[in-house]
Every structure is written in structure tokens, then in C-alpha cells.
Amino acid sequence: MVGQVVVAAGAAVAGALAGKIFGAGGKGAKGDPVFSVAAAANYDHESEIEKYAHLAQIYPEVDAVDVKTPDNWIKRHPHMIRLTGKHPFNVEAPLPEMFDYGFIGPVNLHIVRNHGAVPKIQWETHKISFGGNVPKPFDIGMDELVAMPTETFPVLVTCAGNRRKEQNMIKKSIGFNWGPCGIGNTMWKGVPLRLLLNRAGIFKSGPGARFVCLAGPEGELPKSYDGQDGGPGSYGTSIDMETALDPTSDVILAFEQNGKRLQPDHGYPCRVIIPGYIGGRMIKFLCKVLVTDAESKNFYHFNDNRVLPVGVDAEMATAEGWWFKEEYIINNLNINGAIAYPQHDEVLPANESTYTIKGYAYSGGGRKVIRTEVSFDQGQSWTLANINVREKPRWAAGSSGDKAKHWCWCHWEYTVDAALIKGANEICFRAFDQSQNQMPERPTWNVMGMLNNPWYRVRVHSHPTGGVKFEHPTIAGPTPGGWMHKMAEEAGGELLWGWGGQGNPAAPQRAH
Amino acid sequence: MVGQVVVAAGAAVAGALAGKIFGAGGKGAKGDPVFSVAAAANYDHESEIEKYAHLAQIYPEVDAVDVKTPDNWIKRHPHMIRLTGKHPFNVEAPLPEMFDYGFIGPVNLHIVRNHGAVPKIQWETHKISFGGNVPKPFDIGMDELVAMPTETFPVLVTCAGNRRKEQNMIKKSIGFNWGPCGIGNTMWKGVPLRLLLNRAGIFKSGPGARFVCLAGPEGELPKSYDGQDGGPGSYGTSIDMETALDPTSDVILAFEQNGKRLQPDHGYPCRVIIPGYIGGRMIKFLCKVLVTDAESKNFYHFNDNRVLPVGVDAEMATAEGWWFKEEYIINNLNINGAIAYPQHDEVLPANESTYTIKGYAYSGGGRKVIRTEVSFDQGQSWTLANINVREKPRWAAGSSGDKAKHWCWCHWEYTVDAALIKGANEICFRAFDQSQNQMPERPTWNVMGMLNNPWYRVRVHSHPTGGVKFEHPTIAGPTPGGWMHKMAEEAGGELLWGWGGQGNPAAPQRAH
């Protein structure tokens, strides 16, 4: 059996190093452990990229809505739901439309979170500077970047605010109304950040080099701290050096999406992709990479992308310094998901005998979604839905091991006797990940309305035709409607769960 | 600022390697990424080990209960609660007694999960064999093992069945009645498994070498599969190669606990410690390490340590092959915790004006516990408790980063106006980890009753003295009592939540 072991050149080299550490010997001897990760475990997505070319298409014309905005040069899909008026462009696709594309979605239905006008950047002149506490600072242009070794793989990009509108029904958060499609699962191609850090002379974490700050263009945003990394008006954040250097974290500087150069809304010419993280740390229009001893001092690093405890509102957060407490930073996504079908206002006719419920789920940190479940009795019992669309995980594909990295959404479906649905008050959905983390029963409000992931509940109403009609909790953006919106209106505007409000999300019994 | 960067010898070597990969250049070039991890990030626990010597003490005499068992040579603490009769020894400490020791607990109050009689193994003659698909198989004796480089750090060992008795009140699982102290947080010293794998010629995962099987002595247990790794009657399991080789996973072959050689119940002379994992994979009395292409074929690898969905009972699990579905293996712990004070049957007198609620929390996979919360209104609102006892995390201590590994429990406390407690129906506790995973509101039954982690609820009852008396959900082991036990009795023996039973764990309103 020994003959079956593959001993590649890289392993032999690492072996020699490990031998040195071992040879240093003696109890408590400390060295910096050197190890290698088997790249062969990774499926070759590069070879399949051509079949996604149609999913990188640019919409043929500029949307009339954009004509009088600074973004009047960008061609956008008119189906995108605008969550902050016509400008800036903060959008999600209608969930069923996105879902119908399957595992890989089109670029022009992919979530966009813009803080202002999209910067007009030229490929030929754009430079990304690597500086801070590095032995060998350098600037790199796009042509030089794309000539470096690259990786191509699918990643789900998710706004931490996905499903935030539900939170806003409880109590107004400081964020706008994301529905359940603040996401996009596409193919990304880019250069591993660790290779660029290596080029700058950084090979491990240590004093002076504990964090990597990432920033977009100066002047993109209204607020700054004096002397912040990234410069005045930049949107920036940082990740820890260990994540940046670990090959299995798959942090890349991406320049292609679904096989084509990035579209302007998605960070042209280069954005950071940090799989398993919230989208808010995946800096678009990347300009600066700084190695530092402490976290980024960028205004938005502290005043955005946090989950504070319920009971802490915006005023208290600022007055009491909650934004700066390290416990409340969010990096990895949590387990989450939603029902795509039945969609809102869909009617299941009286004469249908079966129905196929469908939806998506994802988790953070590379964790695999292992169970997707539906309940027709409000959580008293649950039935497994079939996870029928899945990624090939990164880094440990052959081992089914804990270190396999699941960076994408999965799709699930469950075909059920229509009578069961017609007799139910609601359809509840929840998912579990490989660490047995599950979507909670009730939401817990937080001031930014982020990482909202309670059971996704679709209410079932009798319909004059004799069938039933479905109602989602909210409708993305400013459109009123949805059972949670109605509940909030009946409660005087806000449900105030956790703030003295009574009740819970369970659907009331209905007359049959 | 560049002068502040520490460039250690190890980094320079890794740098040269990374340079080679980089130099291989070209788009899509594949190499095995080699990287190093900064050992300097790790706090030196070895130097503080002497102060824990008193926590490694052996109880002075053999417990009378053991005299007529095969374990009549082992000196055990008489306070340990025996969960499976007098033999084999499956025990937990009374939670308040363990909790009062603080962060590091005594060895003889540490959880023990024995499948049969403790094997009598001699240090001098014991060998651990490294074989399977390795270029250089070898056997190693204990003296040789302890001469290798070691690591010392604290780890929480937790049975996946911690808090299982609550599950058994819903419906009898196939496991026995763990209370909330199926845990132990002690200092462990051992040799990194990766160094031993390196010695056997294994430096990375790949075909033929995807898993590491670990097994105890032959004949320890009644059941086997034909030809299982570990041999007939062995208790064995496997972990993936990536976890075994990753230095930051901290998998060690441990031979000391709290600074002394292992006690027999804890795996003398050598057990595996896999931080962040369920205890069931941390093989005691380690005899064999086998490198294989597929998971362990040991009987207990498949028929133990699984969380199957609710609705799958033991008969169905066997008939339909649920034990062999890869989704349901459990490795990492999930977020969990409990209230230590008030303890069961404790009385808060009428004249007390404040009370300090205390407890513990932990999570799996190295994730940090970031929020511990108590509710006096059954989850309508929550207040942060103070996490006042914490570990120094491994591997990224200086960065506060995502890769910092939290392998231990934390302690929390919350001092509250006694009137608030006296006016409540129950005290609810929940915790969150850094990935926003939270303890769920309701339990979900599973056939092994494992990883049970709903809100820990302590009911509050009026007491004749004018104060209040507290009631935990269950009492560990065979002792009846606790609100969940009473509810089950009233329901005819089992609550059957998820199996047609009605109701939920919320305490009813009480007369004040």
C-alpha cells in the first residue's frame, strides 16, 4: 500500500523543513512550524469557465433610472431591486429569478453594495500599492498582477445585511432594507493575497505585521478618521495576517468574474474576495494594501460590519464605545438560508396534488451545510429537504474532512403532498452546518440589522380559488407587504421584540 | 517602521519556498503552497505548569464502590457522579464543585468516559505503532515519545453527550444521562501528531493518505467490524489528514495532564487530544495510528458520535443506513453552556438584595465565545453577562484575529437585583460564538442525544421562607428531579417534542 502514497516535490521540501524542526529536538523546542497543503485537492474550475461566459454578459443599455446620476455610464440589469433609491446603486435580484439560474448566477443579478458613485478607473493606469510594515514595498499594475499565478473558484458573496428588512420591522436599524437575495454566487479569478505579501517580504504574522489593511479609492465616502489607513474618504478594513497568509483561506485579489473582467459595480478593475466572510470586507476598487501591527483605523472598519447586542441602539453604541469592542466585529458569515419557492404572493391552486418547495442555504468559515429542514407545524417537527445543488469544496475534497472549505451556497428542495401545505399555517425553513450551528427560531435585533438568520417563515393563507396563497416576511426594498411588515404596522410601526414588544414570529392559526 | 518587522529564520526559509512557488509563475501554475505559522504567538504555559500540581493529585484511596470491579486498583474521587452504575466508570463532577476551581480543574473531577475496564498498561513496555500507507512505519515507546518536542496548553475535553439527560426527557436516546458537567478543562502536554506523521514520511494529504485512524487496545469493547483498523474489539476513529497536519489544529499525543503523567481513567500512558473536537475522538490508551485513504472502518467510528436528524430513531438508523451518511458525523463541538449558580435546589433568601448568577460557555473549532446572555423574561429581552475568566488563545494571540484558537471554556457572571430574579419564572442563559452561532431556544432530539445545546433554563419557584428556590432541568445520572424530568413524568414518561408531543421548555407563569 505504501506505493500508493503520492510524494510530490513540494512535500519533500516541506519534509526536509519539518525534519529540521523535529531535529531541533528537546522538550519545548520552539520553531515556526512549516507545512504544505495539497493543491491537488482542488478541482480545476479554470477549465470549465467558458461555459459560464453567458453569465458574464453586460446588459445592452443604460437603465433610464441611471441617466441623471454619476453612474450614467454603467449598464445595469433593470430587474435589480434598488434599495436606496436610484443612487447609489444598492441592489439585489428578485430571489426566484436568481435562484432559477442554479449554482452559478449571472454577474448582472449579483448583489451590489455601492457607497457612492462608481469610480472611473483605467486598467492601464491603476496601481495597487503594498506598503506599511513590509521589507519590500511595491506598487503593481493590472497587467503585472494578472501575469502572476492565479486561482479560479466559485464564491458566494453575501452582504452582512442579507435579510435585514426583517430586522427593520422589529425596530429600525441603521441599515437599509435588504431582502433575502443580498447575495451572488459566481466564479472568481484572482491572485492569492499571500503571494503578494510574500513578494513584499511578509511570510508570517508577528509584531508589526499582524494585520493586513485593505482600502479602496480616496474620496469615495463622506467620513474618515484623521490619519486613517487608505486615506481620507476611503472605504477600508483589515483582516488578520493569519487569514491572509493561509492558502486554505483562499483570499484573492480578483480581476475576473464568470470568466470576464469585473464589471464596474463589482469593483473594476480589482476587488478582494475573502471566501466565507461577509461581503463588507471584500474591498472593491482596491488601491492600497498595508501591513500593520493593529487593526485598520479606517472609519468604516469600526463603524460598520458589527453585530452589537440587542439593547444597544445607535446612540448608546456611540456614547459608550460599543463600536470599538473587539467581540462585536463580524467576519465569518453565520448559517442562513431562505425559501425561494413558493415565492411571495404565489398561489397554489386547489387542484395541485404535490408541490416542490425550494430554497438556498449557506454558512461561513468554509463550513458545510449538512441539514436543510422544513416544518409544517411551526417547529414541532421537521423533515429533511434534499440538498440537490452543491459545490466541490476546496482544499480537502478527497477527504470529506473538516478542513474542506465550502465557500458557496447550496440549493435544496422538498416535494410534498399539497394537502400538507394547504393545512399548514406556515412553512418554516432552517439549516444546520457541520458544526451543528443552526438558524435560530427567533430573530435577535442588532443596531446594524446584520447577520439576521432566524427560521425563514412563509405564511399560508386561504385563497378564494380554494387553493392557498403564500406570504413572505417582507419584500426587499421600499415596497410594503409581507406578514412581518403587516405585524409591525399593527403594532404601531415596529414590533419592538427585545425592546418591550410582545409576541413572536409564529403564524396564528387560520380558519380552514 | 520596517525595522519593527520580525523576520525569523523559519520565515526566511519559508520565504525561499514561497518564492519558488511564485517563481514557477504563469497563470494557473499549481504547486503545493508551503507556509509557516508563528509559534511566537503562543503563550508559554509550560512555565506555569507547577502551579497546577495540586490539581493533578490522585485521590488517596480506592472508592469502596470499585472494590468488586476490575477497576479496583484505581483511586477515584468519591464525589464523581456515576452515570452507568458502578462500572464501567462514566462520570461527571457536580457542576458547582468543578466550577469553583476556576479555569483549570482538577484531574480527578474531570469527565471520564470508559467503555469497559481500564486497561493495565505499563509505561516501559507500551508501544504506539505508526503504519498504514506510510513510507516509514515505526513503533515508538513512551520514553522515546516524551523526548520529542512537546506542546503544553489548556484544553476543554467535552463529551458530545454533555447535557444529554435533557434529550432523554424528550425521548429515550441510546445514550446515558449526562448532566451539564460532562467536561473538564485541564492542562495537557504532548507531542504534536504531525511530527510523528512527518517521521513516518507523511507531509501532506493526498490519495492513499487522506485520513489518520486512531485506535485503543484490542478487546476493550464488545463490537467490531471484520478487519477494522485497530483490530478486534478496539475503540477507534479517524480524523482527516489536513487536521492532523495543520499545526494550528494542535492535535497532540498527550502524556501529561496538569503537569503529571496521565491517570489511568484519562488514558494512561497516552491519549489523543484534538482541541475543539468532541471527546469521543480523543482516543485513550492509544495503541495504533494508521494512515489510510478512507475513514476508519472501526465499528464505533460509524455507530457512535453522530447527530442524526430528529425523526430518525435507532431502528430506522440501522435499517436505512443513516450511520454511514457523511453529513451526520460530528467533530467540532457546537456553542454550549450552562448555569452553575444558582445550583439546583438552592434557595435565595427573602432578605438578599443582589445575587450573582454564574456559569460557563464554550464553542468548537477554536471559535471564541463572544456573548453570554441571561434573560428574566423568557427570551423577550437579554442582558450581557460578564465573561470574567478566559484563556489566552493559541496561534494568533496578538492579532485578535479569526485564526486565534479558543480551546477552552470561559466563565461568566452577572450580578443582578434579587427582585428581578424573584419576579421571574425562570432564568434563561444563552451564548454566541465569533461566527454568531447561538444556543437555540428549543432542543432538537437526536437518537444519540448528542450536542444538546438549547438555552439553559433554571426555573424559579416561590419558597415558604419568602425567598425563591431554583430548579435545573435535570439532575445528572439516575437521580430523578428537575423541571424537565417532572414535565416528562406528567407527559407519561417522555415529552416527545418532535414526535407528536406538545408544548415547549418555557416555564409556566407562577403565582407570586
Image (tube, coloured by chain):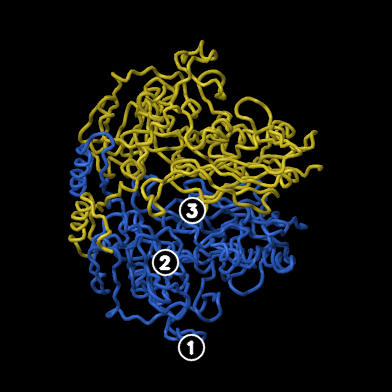
Chain colours: A yellow, B blue
- Which residue is nearer to you in this view: A77 or B253? A77
- Residue that label 3 marks: A435
Residue found at x 52% / y 18%: A87
Where residue A197 sits, quadrant-wise, is top left
Say what amino acid the circle numbered 3 marks. Answer: Ser
Marks 2/3 in contact by CB < 8 Å: the verdict is no
Image position of B296 with respect to A397: above or below: below
- Quadrant of the drawing holding the N terminus of chain B: top left
- Quadrant of the drawing holding the C terminus of chain B: bottom right
- Which residue is nearer to you in this view: B294 or A334? B294
- Residue that label 2 marks: B297
Dot 2 crowding, Cα within 10 Å, few <14, some 14–19, many 20+: some
Residue B67 marker: 1
Of tags 2 and 3, the one toward the viewer is: 2
* Structural distance between the alpha carbons of marks 1 and 2: 36 Å
Residue found at x 64% / y 63%: B473
Image position of B367 with respect to A489: above or below: below
Of tags 1 and 3, the one toward the viewer is: 3
* Structural distance between the alpha carbons of marks 1 and 3: 41 Å
